[in-house]
Amino acid sequence: MDIAQKRVTSPSRAAWMGVLGIMLVQAVVLHGMGRLWICSCGTIRLWVGDIRSIEMSQQVADWYTFSHIIHGILFYGLLRLLLPRLPMLTRLVIAVGIEAGWEIAENTPWVIEAYRLQALARGYVGDSILNSLSDTLSMMTGFALASILPWKATLVLAIVMEVAVGYLVHDNLTLNILNFVHRFPAIEIWQSAVQ
């Protein structure tokens, strides 16, 4: 390997090691917080489609996976805007750090209890470590899509995901944020109507 090639691969390797390191810390901290590695049901599923299932936020993917893909799209846009000179992989490491931080915060008793006040999250017990790591990978997917797609296509993709999930299960990233900040009776009534 010549010196020029080594210079190209070393930052890439360092970035990917950073991503893996952050995800390892995420898993260890969640485990230390008492989170289960997999669903307490003892099975691993790729998808849970029942919004009221006790396996929601416990398996590889569910309706909230789309919110994490949108996180990645948003993080890509914000970091590109705020830190345009940083290499893309460095911005990815930052995005993974933000997402991992949120995943840890999301599984604290205070945030779990705040979610339980929402109509669709009354039985929420937090994420399994499998689900949490999958959420981080979903964010990375959104980040990657935003890096390769034209910005207009990325925007349309995010809007379509947000509207479709909102329509299908009466919840999405926007509603989650709104309900987390302040409970709106009209939204709760609409969400309670979901089967």
Image (cartoon, rainbow, N blue to C red):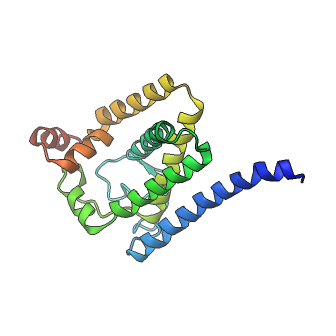
**Please, is residue 149 above or below residue 114 in the view?**
above
Q: Residue at x 38, y 74 (%)?
A: 33
Q: Residue at x 32, y 42 (%)?
A: 173
**Please, is residue 143 above or below residue 42 in the view?**
above
Q: Residue 128: give x, y in percent of width and height.
A: 42, 64
Q: Is residue 102 left or right of residue 184?
A: right
Which residue of the protein is positioned furthest toward the top in this rendering?
152
Q: Residue at x 53, y 34 (%)?
A: 146
**Please, is residue 30 above or below residue 120 in the view?**
below
Q: Residue 151: give x, y in percent of width and height.
A: 50, 26
* Image quadrant where residue 164 sits: top left
Q: Residue 119: give x, y in percent of width and height.
A: 18, 49
Q: Residue at x 55, y 48 (%)?
A: 92
Which residue of the protein is positioned furthest toward the front in this rendering?
85
Looking at this view, is 161 or 83 the one in front?
83
Q: Residue 168: give x, y in percent of width and height.
A: 32, 35
Which residue of the protein is positioned furthest toward the right in this rendering?
2
Looking at this view, is 33 or 52 the one in front?
33
Q: Tell me if I can see residue 46 in this picture.
A: no
Q: Where's the N terminus, which quadrant?
A: bottom right
Q: Tell me if I can see residue 152 in this picture.
A: yes
Looking at this view, is 41 or 183 the one in front?
183
Q: Where's the C terminus, which quadrant?
A: top left
